[in-house]
Image (cartoon, grey):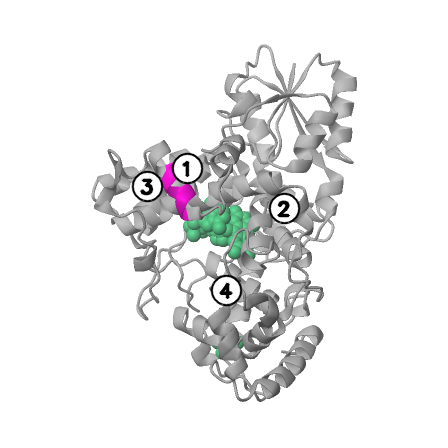
Amino acid sequence: MTIWVFGDQLNRSIGALATADPNRDQILMVLSETKLASRPWHRQRAHLLLASIHRFAEELRAEGFDVDLRRAPTLERGARDHLAETGADELVVTEPNSFDGHRLAERLGARIVASDQFLCHYSEFAVWAEGRRQLKLEDFYRWQRRRLGYLMDGDEPVGDRWNYDHDNRQRAPRDLMWQTPPTDALDDLDHEIIAHIDQYAPHCWGAPPDGTWATTRRGALERLAFFVEHVLPGFGPHEDAMVERSWHLAHSLLSPYLNLGLLLPGEACDAVEAAHRSGAVPIASAEGFIRQIIGWREYVWGIYWREMPEYRDLNHLGAHRPLPPVLADTAPTKMNCVTHAVTAVHDHAYAHHIQRLMVIGNLALLAGVDPAELNDWMWSGFIDGAEWVMLPNVIGMSQFADGGLMATKPYAAGGNYIDKMSDYCGSCAYQRSQRTGDDACPFTTLYWDFIARHADRFERNPRMARQVSASRRLNDLEAVRERAVQVLELLDRGEL
Ligand code: FAD
Ligand code: SF4
């Protein structure tokens, strides 16, 4: 029989591969030319994918497997050609991580083996969600903690608190520095892929790979060990902070490995819990990290499967502005916060969570950018892009395009929030508190314009009603809205 391994299932111990036998089973891996050419991938993203797939195929070959790693016009064509050429009696797949992948496996008549790549199978999430009026992350997270036993003393949370989020919203002190992420030297395979990357992914952009992103399981485990030892102790307090001098702060940079299967969520949480129990890591940092993994990550996984396929096309706020040049073409901007976020994406195919949500996402939300266009841009630009994680985060959390399923209110904020959490505003050409005039912070102007634009919709939302009445009391609202028109024109022309 043939076991077909998708490019985001690169782990020997999950699903169908867990029981695979080199004496019995053949392995199929397909590089889809259509998928690689379908969007303008970031170079580092394209390299990560291609190098990880090639190296995983090599590891399986070293174990004795016959691996058919083939390029094909589409995934389907590749699988059908393989079956025709080898005469394999059965095609087996581990449940694919995307809705379309699942449909494809069904269409091909493959035997689908349950996946244990996540800690909560989406069928378990569906049972948890059944009959609840609201799918609150905190409820799900506590359910997961109890079920999985992370940071628990019997039935109670370690430290007697479930959540240290409140302690983890500090601004970063001026003199604090973070460990530089490890890098690996690029080898012959890397150079070969980089030299021919345009043949695989014809429209790629961004800085070339520099060894930051590991492309093997061993490399991913080394990154996890580095994070736990050197970075995790400071993970908690400055989770929401943004600074000019660091693109990563105390973030783990583990998402690409988790999303490709090179790392499993359970082993990341086990390592973090062990570090806390040994006394090396404060509870706020350990809890903060474990909440991201067993809470947020698994929650968006469950939401994706529950809401697909309709979720892709949601646009609750009727936002139709095309992606502005500052994102589409990395056009220069005087907005210092945006410059730092977009430069991080260009240089590393990465921006950390608050840059994604409160800078890039916030700008798109306030400006009324089409959520699907923003989603596509992030998908092709981020090292960790995948449909299941992007739709709930981008369409739901960041753009409020699902009308409040993921977030009870839009993540909209003016310059004051960005100033509170960052050191960007001091050296910016714009004035964060000003909402009218040429020097006004575009976020502040657009924030009030956004609230006024959607006042009828948001006045019924208990978490937004106060902002709506504050906007109605602004004595310069007319001038703010006139300035907003200018700001949007400048944004559209790439001149903001
Ligand atoms: P850390 O800050 O170190 O967090 C640890 C881990 O927690 C992450 O590696 C990730 O696996 C998990 N995690 C934390 N928050 C989330 C979340 N909201 N959803 C899912 N997992 C989470 N994540 C992706 O994996 N791919 C994406 O393409 C992606 N796009 C995003 C777009 C927007 C607009 C927003 C708001 C969030 C997005 N996220 C995405 C979620 C989150 O921002 C990233 O997982 C995180 O920034 C990855 O960096 P890290 O590994 O250094 O994370
Ligand atoms: Fe960003 Fe406004 Fe601050 Fe400038 S002033 S960095 S545009 S929030």
Magenta span: 138-144
Separation of disc 2 and disc 4 at Cα?
A: 26 Å
What secondary structure characterizes most of the magenta part? helix
> Where on the picture, by quarter, is residue 119?
top left
Q: Position of residue 448 (x, y in %)?
A: 55, 77
Looking at the picture, which amino acid does disc 3 mark? Answer: Val
The answer to the question of whether label 3 and label 2 lie on touching residues, with beta carbons closer than 8 A, is no
Element class at badge 3: helix
Looking at the rendered image, the quarter that the C terminus falls into is: bottom right
Give the residue number, with chain letter if any, for mark 2. 46
Separation of disc 3 and disc 1 at Cα?
A: 13 Å
Element class at badge 2: helix
Identify the residue at the far left of this view. Answer: 279
Separation of disc 2 and disc 1 at Cα?
A: 21 Å
Q: Residues within 10 Å of mark 2 (few under 14, many from 20)?
A: many
Q: Which of marks 3 and 4 is in front?
A: 4
- The foreground one among 115 and 309 is 309
Q: Position of residue 491 (x, y in %)?
A: 66, 75
Mark closer to the chain start, 4 or 1: 1
In the rendered view, does 291 fall on the left or right side of 102? left
Give the residue number, with chain letter if any, for mark 1. 221
Give the residue number, with chain letter if any, for mark 3. 272
Looking at the picture, which amino acid does disc 1 mark? Answer: Leu
Give the residue number, with chain letter if any, for mark 4. 358
Q: Where is residue 345 in the image (x, y as percent from the top left)?
A: 56, 59
The answer to the question of whether label 3 and label 4 lie on touching residues, with beta carbons closer than 8 A, is no
What residue is drawn where x is 51% and y is 36%? 130
